Image (spheres, grey):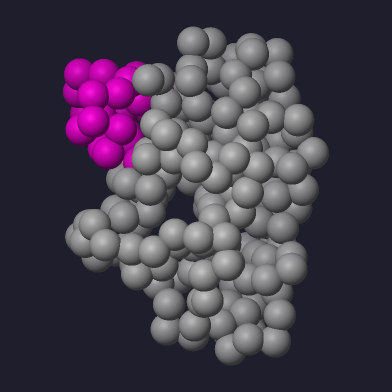
């Protein structure tokens, strides 16, 4: 398969690219700076310094089987990186005929923004990022594409464990987390064999 990865230079995106290549797929990595990745068989790097610019996506998407968004927002302050980037991707996917989109969101948005300890904690710490994920999800669900929105809890940098739970109604606790490597494995799994089309799977250890 040819997998286009948005946010490929980020902590999660790098794992997605690596996992796709390890499984023999072609990875098209959208990055802010050229030379982010070293040369590797099956890897194509496309510079995308501005997520509102569709020209780089127009070059990257033809022939793709799936777009995986691992975009993340700024550490502090208001951010629209996820919303703007996915909006650009959706616009370009419609014109290039690519129909499959898998986007990483976060548990605690929209209907999962409840009174649980987890939801309260995440909104107290990264509210701006959560707002960006909420508006991003609206772009995805209105796109008319074959989408999957993955809602992980807190992300960690643990090495891949290979043991995790996935489901639409998994309970997420204050201590819930998932390693980025395992999240990447699930994203590539879902690209290879869709199980959660037009759905919001959660994933946790």
Q: Position of residue 67 (x, y in %)?
A: 52, 30
**Residue 144 versus residue 132: which sits nearer the camera?**
144
As drawn, 116 above or below 185: below
User: Quick check: can you spot residue 106?
Assistant: yes
Q: Is residue 28 magenta?
A: yes
**Residue 199 versus residue 58: which sits nearer the camera?**
199
Question: Which residue is depicted at the point 32% across and 46% down?
Answer: 185
Q: Position of residue 7 (x, y in %)?
A: 47, 41
Q: Quadrant of the N terminus?
A: top left
Q: Is residue 200 left or right of residue 143?
A: left
Question: Which residue is depicted at the point 58% across and 77% down?
Answer: 122
Question: Which residue is depicted at the point 71% across and 19% down?
Answer: 94
Q: Position of residue 2 (x, y in %)?
A: 40, 20
Q: Quadrant of the C terminus?
A: bottom left
Q: Is residue 117 magenta?
A: no
Question: Which residue is depicted at the point 26% across and 19% down?
Answer: 42
Q: Position of residue 116 (x, y in %)?
A: 63, 86
As drawn, 202 above or below 146: below
**Residue 58 versus residue 160: which sits nearer the camera?**
160
User: Quick check: can you spot residue 74?
Assistant: no
As drawn, 168 above or below 145: below
Residue range of the region highlighted in magenta in the rendering = 16-45
Q: Is residue 14 left or right of residue 120?
A: left
Q: Is residue 18 left or right of residue 166?
A: left
As drawn, 34 above or below 137: above
């Amino acid at each position: 398969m040819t997998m286009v990865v948005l946010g490929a230079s980020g902590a999660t995106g790098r794992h997605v690219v690596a996992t796709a290549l390890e499984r023999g797929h072609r990875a098209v990595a959208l990055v802010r700076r050229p030379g982010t990745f070293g040369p590797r068989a099956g890897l194509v790097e496309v510079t995308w310094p501005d997520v509102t610019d569709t020209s780089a996506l127009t070059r990257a998407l033809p022939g793709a089987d799936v777009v995986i968004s691992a975009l993340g927002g700024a550490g502090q302050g208001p951010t629209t990186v996820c919303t703007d980037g996915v909006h650009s991707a959706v616009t370009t996917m419609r014109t290039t005929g690519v129909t499959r989109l898998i986007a990483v969101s976060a548990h605690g948005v929209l209907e999962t923004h409840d009174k649980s300890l987890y939801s309260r904690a995440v909104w107290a710490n990264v509210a701006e990022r959560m707002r960006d994920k909420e508006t991003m999800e609206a772009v995805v669900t209105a796109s008319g594409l074959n989408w999957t929105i993955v809602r992980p809890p807190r992300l960690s940098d643990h090495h891949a464990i290979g043991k995790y739970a996935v489901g639409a109604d998994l309970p997420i606790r204050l201590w819930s987390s998932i390693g980025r490597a395992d999240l990447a494995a699930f994203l590539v799994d879902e690209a290879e064999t869709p199980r959660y089309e037009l759905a919001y799977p959660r994933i946790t250890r």
